[in-house]
Structures are given as C-alpha cells and as structure tokens.
Amino acid sequence: MGWEKGFIHEKTGGKKDQPNIWGSNDLSETINFIYAEKDSIWGADDDTDIEYIYQELLFSSPTLDITGEQIRKAWLDHINIEEENYLWVSNQKAFDLMQEGKIPPETSDPDLNEHYEMIDAQLTTEIFGFFAPTKPIIAVELAHLAVRTTARYNAAWIAEFNIIMYSLASLETQHENIKDKLQWMAKEARKHLPNDSYSAKMFDFVSAQYQSGVSWETARDSLHYKYQIQQADGYQWSTLDESCSGCFAAGINFGASIVSLLYGEGNIKETIKIGALAGWDSDNPTATWGGLLGFMIGKNEIEKVFDKEFAVEFNIHRTRKGFPNNGIDTFENMAKKGIAIVDRVVESKMSGRVDLKKNQWIIPIK
C-alpha cells in the first residue's frame, strides 16, 4: 500500500528520515518532497489503479448500477495473479476470494475476509464522489457495491465519508475560503457516521483537539495514545492485528487523515506534509486529501504552489494490465471519460440535464 509506511514523527520537514516498517529508506536521507520530472510518466499505484478500473468499468458499462459480477470480472481482467500485483490486506483477500468464485459483496464478508475493517476501500472508491457532483447521497449509492467489495462496518462508513467529501467539493457555497468550506464539508460527511461508531468518535476527538488549539503533533500523539494504546471506544485493531498493531486499519488511518485535513486548513502542501508525517499507512489518506484539494484548486494552482510543471501522462500498466495503448493514458483523456460518466449520472440519477452549449450541468437543488 505504498512505500511511506512507518512511524515518522518530526515537527518539520528537512530532518533525518527514519526507515519504514520493512527497514528500508532508499529515497532520501531527509524528510522532504520528491518530484518526478515534468517529461516523465506517472506510474500507477494502489491509490489510483483500482479507481482507474472502476472508471473504465462505468465508462464502458451500459448501466451505472454495476453488479458484483462486473466488478469481479474487471478485477480478474486487470489484476495480475501470480506476479507482484500491488494488492494488500483486504484488497488481496477479496481478490483471492474472487479467484475462488466469490462475488462482491461476499468478498468482504467478515466470515470470509478477516481484513474487512482495513483501509482498502478508503483509497479505492473516492472517485465515485466526483461522479455525483453536489449529490452525496447519489454518490454513496453509486459506490455502495464497490465499497463493499472489500469493506464492512467502520471501514465502509469511512470510505463513504471520503466519497461524500469528494461529492461536496463541487458544490458552490458562501464560504469565504477553502479552509472554511473544507470544515463545513467534513461536518456534513460526519453526519453519515453512526454516532456510536469508533469512526465517529475518532472524528469528534480529532476535531476537539483542533478546536482546542493544540499543535497537530500533539493531536496526532493524543490520537495514538487514546486509540492505539488505550483502545478507547471499542477500537481494538492494534491488538487484533498482530502483524503491525493495526497499522493498515481503517480507523486509526482515518483519525490521522482528519488530523491532516483539519490542520492543513486547505493548504495542499501543508496537508500532504502533515498526512505523510502522521505515520501509519500515511501515503493513502494523504493521497485522498491531495486528490480532493487538487480537484478544488485545479492544475494551475497546484503547479503554482509547488513551483513545478508536472507530467500529464499516466501508466496504468505499472500495477495493472489489459488496457489499450500498452497502458499509457493522459489525465486529459481520463478527465473526459469521467465527465462523460457525470453526464450520464446527472441525466439518469439526478433528473438533471447537460447543456453542451454552455458546458454546464443543470442539477436540481432537491
């Protein structure tokens, strides 16, 4: 699930980096941003490749209500079985079950998949929020089966929290700045979490830490102590998962993601920095908020913030297989396919219409 995993805890970048849980650190001696050259090609990873599969599936499917059989076929068609396939935890278990003939949502059944409350769905389904702009209920409905390909209970609710955030990103509001809008979006998404769930209580805890004015480092350490050490609010994955004390669990990574979201305050660079430094499965929640903020501010602003011109091509075959053009795609082409899906969602799910002359979606308020 990425290469940044580890218990990295530093107040600022530029300090000595520490090895990840596998003992390797072959990228940099210090904590900092590392950039690909602008004429290079982005390589797919687990933060992007399953979503790429889902977009291609929706784009080619005659119906937006994709079935478990369609999901299973898409996974089997595009994921390697024997060689390195860049799957981990619940994704890998679900894929194993698919090879045995199981069909989603059976692939996340706790009796069959012991990883049902791991992080996986949080990083493979956010894109469904983009497919239903301003309508989070419809977004969650579109994503229901994709989420439950690998997740149940808290892991599913957390994935849907992220989907709601992505859906609300398109909504024009009266907020004065992106910080205020993000905090409103997060409060709206929080309503989806059952109040008695540990995911809801983690959100409330981190939010209270932020409102109290303590530093993000203090909030992160308090989160660790309360949920990893004390195992409060029924959160027991640090004990149940003996492999790495629940480092891939949905809950603790969600809590860490809320630290980066709130303390990043809409600054994409700061949000990514805090998310990466927070630890646990840190690349994945960071990719979620990086994607959200990138969508909200746009490509030009991203390149302005980082003072870099970024590559425009994407190689899905770095981690997946079976796509045209030997897996080489462009972000422009991917965006066009996404827009085509939104057109269908607006017309068939929202009772809206597409105005091609004005290049607008006309979406009813209710």
Image: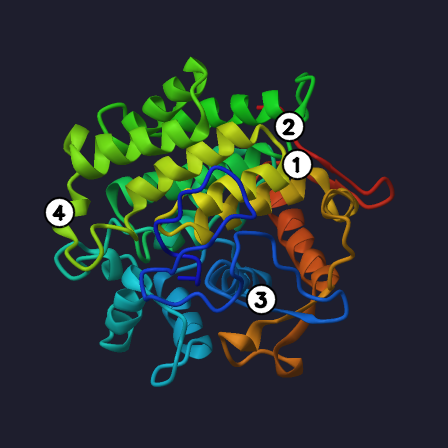
Nearest the camera: 3 or 266? Answer: 3
Please tell me in which quadrant of the rendered image residue 256 appears: top left
Indicate which label's residue lies in the foreground, 4 or 3: 4
Q: Quadrant of the C terminus?
A: top right
Indicate which label's residue lies in the foreground, 2 or 4: 4
Kindly indicate whether the residue at mark 3 contacts the one at mark 2 (C-beta within 8 angstroms). no
- The answer to which of marks 3 and 1 sits earlier in the sequence is 3
Point out which mark residue 352 bears: 1
Q: Which residue is rendered at x = 60% and y = 53% of the image?
A: 33
Q: How many marks?
A: 4
Density class for disc 4 (Cα within 10 Å; few <14, some 14-19, many ≥20) is some
The amino acid on which the numbered mark 3 sits, given as a three-letter code, is: Ser
- The residue labelled by disc 4 is 239
- The residue labelled by disc 3 is 60
The amino acid on which the numbered mark 4 sits, given as a three-letter code, is: Thr
Point out which mark residue 364 bears: 2
- The answer to which of marks 2 and 1 sits earlier in the sequence is 1
The CA span between labels 4 and 1 is 49 Å
- The answer to which of marks 4 and 1 sits earlier in the sequence is 4
